[in-house]
Amino acid sequence: MTDAPPPYDIIVIGGGVNGAGIARDAAGRGARVLLIEQGDLAQGTSSASTKLIHGGLRYLEHYEFALVREALKEREILWGIAPHIIWPMRFVLPYRDGLRPRWLLRLGLFLYDHIGGRKKLPATRTVNLTKHPAGTPLQPQYRQGFEYSDGWVDDARLVLLNARDAADKGARVRTRTRADMLRCENGMWVVDATGHNGHAYRFTARSIVNAAGPAVLDLLRRADAEPDHSMRLVRGSHIVVARRFEHDYSYFFQLPDGRIFFAIPYERDFTLIGTTDVDHEGTLADIHASAEEIAYLCEGASEYFREPVIPADVVWSYSGVRPLVEDGSGRPEAATRGYRIDLDMNEGAPLLTIYGGKITSYRHVAEEAVDALAAHIPALSRKHWTAQAPLPGGNFRPDGAAAIRAQYRLDYPFLPSATVDRIAKAYGTDARKWLSDADGWDALGGEIAHGLSVAELHWMVSREWALTSDDILWRRSKLGLHFTAQEVERLDALIDAIAVKPALPD
């Protein structure tokens, strides 16, 4: 068993968006931080979202005004610090006779535009779908609708870039490391952990942050601590089909059962449809879209699109379990998306637990969590900083993404347009760190497939904690939708052949 260096100020357990955000904030305030994740960064819920930075329009009808207001305020802050992985998107909400009345939709959208301090995003407007581009793929009965603003995010890279920035500020990041047992001894937390190679570790810290998401209660049991809240695990599933429309608008659809879902342009060639809200009864090791959920999303989409969507059209599906605070709501879609932060001093040292939350509010959650610890950790500054500091690669104006792509096309003319777009959106200005002065594929070690080069693979392994082809294809990029089985085998061989592959890079 290996002892850590002198005690950490904070050990964050959970490498999802909340854990990575807290590690970044705390490291930037001067704390010695260790981030532990039992799998890959964003392997769970944080890479299984609908990929939206939004206030949650539907939460208004559940009277969650404070939650929506907070998320709407965060929307433009996050766009400002990560304009490569976050960008504005216009949504079209078709009016459907017999469901929510026009006046209610207008009122909800008016509140949505005004309660969150919107400054840069365009406002809502009424549209004629017989003339609007978004009306073309819809059935003819949808003649009127509303167009409003929200944001898109590459959710897994949002987590990754927070972890990367935390490490750049001195934090230690250990993936594939499971916290087996936590106990408090003489005012210090001791964490016994196991690495992916079976190696045993022991870490000590002045405080623990439990950011384990759906496993939050299980981690509390490992710490022999009592939870302050009950949790409700709600599964959200999504399907991906071949692109159903050529324009760049997204859709917000209503269904007769009162639920809503989205249809969103996805990775150039596809349409993402979701999500469901189903109480999850299985284990966290087996999370997948059921046949019933896939059929539900297909049937819902077919009520709007001229071209029906059937289960055979689904090229990929994914699911995530949202850890929601149990508030007694009867239906899973009505359960609160709010969060709770509990600071427990019963063991003699801080144990801070995050219950619930949503991806849009992660930065604010992290700030509040680190504030709560600052009273007990002398090394922590009380100065807030994450609202202004860009994430790695995001050091350009929010309206500058197109210029970044245009410059890459000029500087690397051998790269296909689709590859330039993907690289610019994934790395922003940081792409030059591995593209360097390359004048062709050979200078990048060659192309593996679909615009993924050996140089980029080395970057993902050495700087982004990637260890498997799944890490690379489904979280570092979304190229898994394009790679064939043979191309995945080649990628696996290249990963294995990388001579210096740190198992737990900092």
Image (tube, grey):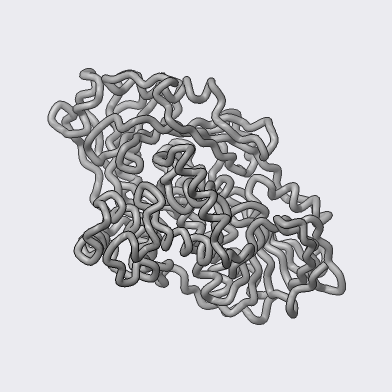
- Please name whichever residue, 122 or 109, is drawn nearer the observer in this view of the structure: 122
Task: Check the picture and name the quadrant holding the N terminus.
Answer: bottom right
Instruction: Left or right? Give the position of 319 relative to 70.
Output: right
Query: Taking 486 as reference, is 435 left or right?
Result: left
Name the image quarter holding residue 408.
bottom left
Residue at image coords 76%, 53%:
220
Residue at 22 percent of width and 38 percent of height:
247
Residue at point 80% right, 53% down?
A: 222
Q: From the top left corner, tell me how far across and down residue 237 is, in percent.
A: 51, 33
Q: Residue furthest toward the left? A: 131
At which x and y percent is residue 100?
35, 26
Question: Could you say which quadrant of the image residue 299 lies in?
Answer: top left
Rendered residue at 79%/67% (across/down): 202
Spot occupied by residue 497 in the image (x, y as percentages of width and height): 55, 58
Residue 318 visible to the viewer: yes
**Above or below: residue 473 compared with residue 276:** below
